[in-house]
Amino acid sequence: MAKIRGRKNSTKKEVIIEKASKLFQEKGFGAASMRDLAENVGVEAASLYNHIQSKSEILQAICFRVANEFISHLDAVEASQELTLKKIEMIIRFHIRMMMDQYEYVYISDHEWRHLPEPYLSNFLNQRRNYRKSLADLIGQGMERGEMKQIDPYVAVLTILSAISGIESWQRSRKHISAEILETNMVKYLIEGLKK
Amino acid sequence: MAKIRGRKNSTKKEVIIEKASKLFQEKGFGAASMRDLAENVGVEAASLYNHIQSKSEILQAICFRVANEFISHLDAVEASQELTLKKIEMIIRFHIRMMMDQYEYVYISDHEWRHLPEPYLSNFLNQRRNYRKSLADLIGQGMERGEMKQIDPYVAVLTILSAISGIESWQRSRKHISAEILETNMVKYLIEGLKK
């Protein structure tokens, strides 16, 4: 009995997080209220608290879920036997697809992490710093191996991640081109710029 | 006498716009009050109205000043006799320097234009659309002339402008590298990615 309720609860929690991700992306974490969220989920505000403790708990769940996805992917890529440039291409593609398929989650993790309470905030920022450092190290490695041009790795990481985050504006007005053309062309631009 | 007061007023107005640009960038246009602004300028809120009519007037001044700078530069570049790839490099460099030298102005023009009242909002968005279209046309031209790889021009513009707007995060923690290294390396990355 407890087990079934447990399963039921976690499904409900997932629904709440899903609705919250859309709400936080549209209104911003600060402006979105538990009342708004309850309305979107279709329950009374009070009953939300049977499933989650606070708005902050939802933000934590979203930010750390996104961070985990990126870190797990990076670990898998690093462990693979591909050439460095191919590894970087795999990472760029993964970032682009995350921006397309899990837009609200990635948006919140990119823009609303400032609202995380401690110790989550420091932990999140540490993970982000380490992630970017690993990317920069990978790019440095590609240069040492002669696969890539000499470009400052910090600037290369900044350029790649910023270019991809620009997919936000594509998400806001999707009329221009298809997801496939966007992915193919952005990968081409960013990889050709690195290739020796 | 009227002339001197006129000159004095326009100088004071400039000071107000300058202080407002920092305030709007830090707090956001919506959250920044005329009272905050008066405090930063060092005058009573009521006396601000001797120089400007509203918060909105300041936002208009900032957004259209930035737009004018970019449009004038683009016009000059288009009229020059350089190769297309060189023209694009000039435009990329100009954007990077604007992000470095006039950070608050560019930031507000990029993020706070949503608060412009009509007819300024439509006018601003039209100018922005035309500017991006001119850039895409220039890139298309470079491909036709065989100077550049085949990359979808819309994606190329999105990649370039988004990468440059990432300089925001460099502005927030300048410790990593110098402005010069950032400019040199980002130009190299973005131009090499286009070059045939």
Image: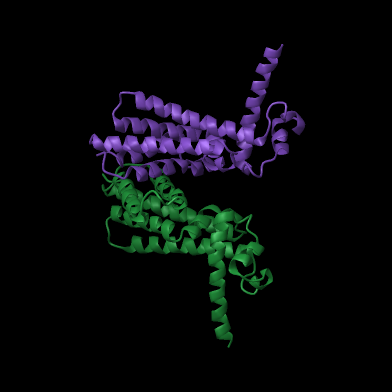
Chain colours: A green, B purple
Is B125 located above or below residue A71 in the figure?
above
Residue A175 at least partly seen: yes
Give the left or right position of residue B42, taking residue A148 as reference.
Answer: right
Residue A50, image x and y in percent?
64, 74
Residue B68, image x and y in percent?
49, 29
Is B11 located above or below residue B125 in the figure?
above
Residue in the image at 55% along x and 76% along y: A10
Q: Give B172 or B122, whichever is nearer the viewer.
A: B122
Quadrant of the rendered structure where residue A73 is? bottom left
Give the left or right position of residue B181, taking residue A119 as reference.
Answer: left
Give the left or right position of residue A103, taking residue B144 as reference.
Answer: right
Residue in the image at 73% along x and 37% along y: B35
Residue A163, image x and y in percent?
41, 47
Residue in the image at 33% along x and 55% along y: A180
- Looking at the rendered image, the quarter that the N terminus of chain B falls into is top right
- Looking at the rendered image, the quarter that the C terminus of chain B falls into is top left
Q: Residue furthest bottom?
A: A1
